[in-house]
Amino acid sequence: MELEQIYHKLWEIYTSQNPEVQKIYDLFTREGERVVNDHIAFRTYNFPRIGIDVLARPFIANGYVEKGSYRFEEKKLFARHFEVPGNPEAPRVFISELLLENFSSYLRETIQGVFSQIPADTLNSENLIFSGRTWEKPSFETYNRLKEESEYAAWVYVFGFCANHFTVSVNYLSKHDSVEKVNSLLKDNGFLINDSGGEIKGTPSELLEQSSTRSGIIRVEFTEGVFEIPGCYYEFARRYPDEHGHLYSGFIAKSADKIFESTNYYKK
């Protein structure tokens, strides 16, 4: 599958999961902005057959190369990011995985049970990143028990393999050319900003500023009934040039750590 097809399919699934995202995209276009994606992010567990290397395959087959790796001690995650050399408008791909060995036997056994249900043809397919939840209907009780240890683990348990978020590149916006202006636009139109660690993560001196919406609340069918939980969110990033005049292209672990918390919020 070619890259444009991959991007389109990921976007379709992403916006159908959380229609609020499409509303934000449409808001930017009504403002006359051209929306360019800075990066697309994915979540998974560190089993060899569903880990970072596996999810990255369709991107690597289309010219992506690894550019950086990151550790998140508090969240117990490892991540890598990938880029297409020479194509600045191709979105970076950021894939993180939960380090299961750092969690309880309950969490490990639960996720092992989930993993064992993934069909072999899905595991061996380049379509794994689109497959969503390929195991039985989730339990709300299990979701909540997983969430006590790791919100990340619980989110993947419910949603499976899909884009966790897309990211608007503020560098390509003309009217709303700062993260502050983007946040103001969103708040003025009724969208909630993730304020964990502050509304803006990172600084110009760190060469990267980021913000994100709080995840939209969506209705999900569990074995016990239908419940409302956080879905996905939209992120915004502005990159700054280094001393050589090149835009910083990596990620800042302490900032990303707080961006992960965009899926922590619940309807009050």
Image (tube, helix red, strand yellow):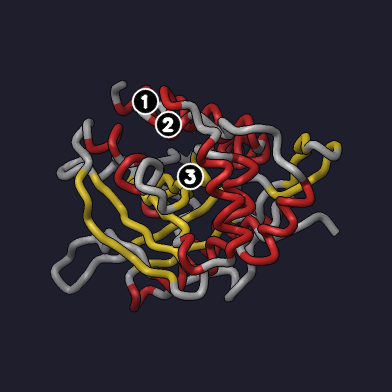
The answer to whether marks 1 and 2 mark residues whose Cβ atoms lie closer than 8 Å is: yes
Q: Identify residue for label 2.
A: 128
Residue at 56%, 38% (x, y): give it.
25
Q: Amino acid at mark 1?
A: Ser
Relative vertical location of residue 52 with respect to residue 221 in this rendering, above or below:
below
Left or right of residue 134, residue 214 in this image: right
Task: Name the front one of labels 1 and 3.
Answer: 1
Q: Position of residue 10 (x, y in %)?
A: 47, 31
Nearest the viewer among 174 and 98 is: 98
For the residues marked 1 and 2, what is the alpha-carbon distance in whole angstroms?
Answer: 6 Å
For the residues marked 1 and 3, what is the alpha-carbon distance in whole angstroms?
Answer: 23 Å
Q: Residues within 10 Å of mark 2 (few under 14, many from 20)?
A: many
Residue 99: image quadrant is: bottom left
Q: Identify residue for label 1.
A: 125
Q: Would residue 31 be visible to someone looking at this image? A: no
Residue at 70%, 57% (x, y): give it.
192
Q: Position of residue 144 (x, y in %)?
A: 74, 56
Q: Position of residue 52 (x, y in %)?
A: 35, 48
For the residues marked 2 and 3, what is the alpha-carbon distance in whole angstroms?
Answer: 18 Å
Q: Residues within 10 Å of mark 1 (few under 14, many from 20)?
A: few
